[in-house]
Image (tube, grey):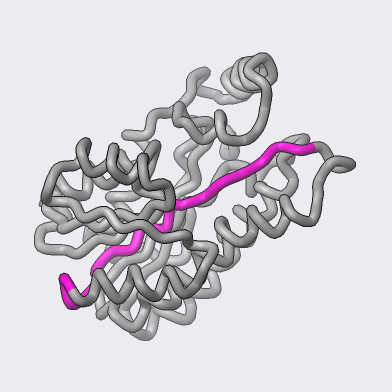
Amino acid sequence: MKLANKIALITGGTSGIGLEAAKLFRDEGAKVVIIGSDAQRLKDAERALGDSVTALRADLRDPEQIDRAIAEVIETHGRIDVIYANAGAGKAAPLEAVTREQIDEQFALNFTGLFFTIQKAAPYLSQGSSIVVTTSFLNAVGTPGLSILSATKAAVRSLVRSLGAELAPRGIRINAVSPGPIDTPFATKMGLPDADLRKAGEALTAAVPLKRFGTVSEVAKAALFLASDDASFVTGTEVAVDGGMTQI
């Protein structure tokens, strides 16, 4: 088992990539704690994952709630070995329609919440621990209507390099997994009408060299690689799981 006896904390663990990663990390021997903000999705995730996984409710836009969640993990387990900072959200809007509230909301979760999750958990990480974050193919390509979401993911990519340099002396690794178009509920939360979602999906499929959407399992497996000792000499990098979209 790649994560035997590890304590793994996964944010955004109630659906999509995060939920699949929680299942995979659990099956690979980790004691998994997931964090989500929606009470019903947390209950659904608990049922899907079983009693061996702990589900905590916290809004990562609020640093005090992050503090409480981390304190609960430490009180129960005493340490953290793996952080998978996966929580994120986005809203599609053209340039002229972007509001200050949309900017603040997306950066608050995708960047600030991710940063403080890592910052507040870092004192409980030891040599050999691993941090994985979710970025996106959007940090490498220009996509109309997704300027703010793309900017948050580019900021996270930069953060991985900076924190990689800062944490390396402690023997702690940090890397990013960068999904391309993935079959998850994420797109349905972006505020686009169904017809526009369908058109966007068709255009994305055509743009992917492998001519299909990826699966949550394929992204979770990449996150597992980065979290495990299989990637013990890998830090500061980004693994693209995008069917070649940003590479070919």
Marks counted in the figure total: 0
Up-down: is 133 above or below 139? below
243 over 14 or under it: above or below: above
Query: Does 248 appear above or below 73?
Result: above
The quadrant where residue 138 appears: top right
Is residue 222 visible to us here? no
Instruction: Tell me which segment is drawn in magenta.
Output: 76-93
Q: Position of residue 7 (x, y in %)?
A: 20, 64
Query: What residue sits 37% from the left and 47% below the top?
Result: 39
Task: Report the side of 184 relative to 187 (left or right).
Answer: left
91 in magenta: yes
Camera-side residue of 41 and 123: 41
- The secondary structure making up most of the magenta span is loop
Residue found at x 12% / y 48%: 51
In the image, 1 versus 89, the foreground residue is: 89
- Going 81% across and 50% down the picture, which residue do you hit? 99
The x, y position of residue 171, in whole percent, is 31, 79
The quadrant the C terminus occupies is top right
Tell whether 28 sits left or right of 82: left
Can residue 169 be seen here? yes
Q: Quadrant of residue 103?
A: bottom right
Where residue 217 appears, x then y in whole percent? Answer: 32, 34
Q: Is residue 11 magenta?
A: no
Q: Residue furthest front?
A: 39
